[in-house]
Image: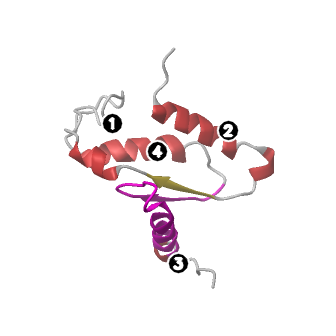
């Protein structure tokens, strides 16, 4: 049985979020490859390219990203999940991109940054 990368990612996140050690932890998710999603032709059913999704027709690319986000956000209801979407993570910029994402999430949620 073939499993998509999205499904594997959701499964891993679900397992992490249900781990007893992390039961009171909040999570930060960085969604990668926004640029690749934006370059794809929008799907008529709001599904990401290659995926299946809602039956409601849409031409809105943000609907695909929203659907992907909801798959993760629906895994945990009792804790906060901070999220940020980035265009590209690679070896050369991963540290700066993660720091920028943390700063953006903190600013958006009015969370003081550590000094």
Whether the magenta-drawn stretch holds residue 104 is answered as yes
Magenta residue span: 79-106
Give the label, 1 or 3, closer to the camera.
1
Q: Quadrant of the C terminus?
A: bottom right
Pick whichever, 23 or 97, lies toward us. 97
Q: Distance between the Cα atoms at labels 1 and 2?
A: 23 Å
The percent coordinates of residue 80 (x first, y second) are 61, 59
Give the label, 3 or 2, closer to the camera.
2
The percent coordinates of residue 35 (x first, y second) are 29, 51
Q: Are marks 2 and 4 in contact (CB under 8 Å)?
A: no
Whether the magenta-drawn stretch holds residue 85 is answered as yes
Mark 4 highlights which residue?
70
Q: Residue at x 54, y 32 (%)?
A: 8
Mark 1 highlights which residue?
48
Q: Is residue 51 above or below residue 92?
A: above
Q: Earlier in the sequence, mark 3 or mark 2?
A: 2
Q: Earlier in the sequence, mark 4 or mark 3?
A: 4
Q: Which mark is residue 15?
A: 2
């Amino acid at each position: 049985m073939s499993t998509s990368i999205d499904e594997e990612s959701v499964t891993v996140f679900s397992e992490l979020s249900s781990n007893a050690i992390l039961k009171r932890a909040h999570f930060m998710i960085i969604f990668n490859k926004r640029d690749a999603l934006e370059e794809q032709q929008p799907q008529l059913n709001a599904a990401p390219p290659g995926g299946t999704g809602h039956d409601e027709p849409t031409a809105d690319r943000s609907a695909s990203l929203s659907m992907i986000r909801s798959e993760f956000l629906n895994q945990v209801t009792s804790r906060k999940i901070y999220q940020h979407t980035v265009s590209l993570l690679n070896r050369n910029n991963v540290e700066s991109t993660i720091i920028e994402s943390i700063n953006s999430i903190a600013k958006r949620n009015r969370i003081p940054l550590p000094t």
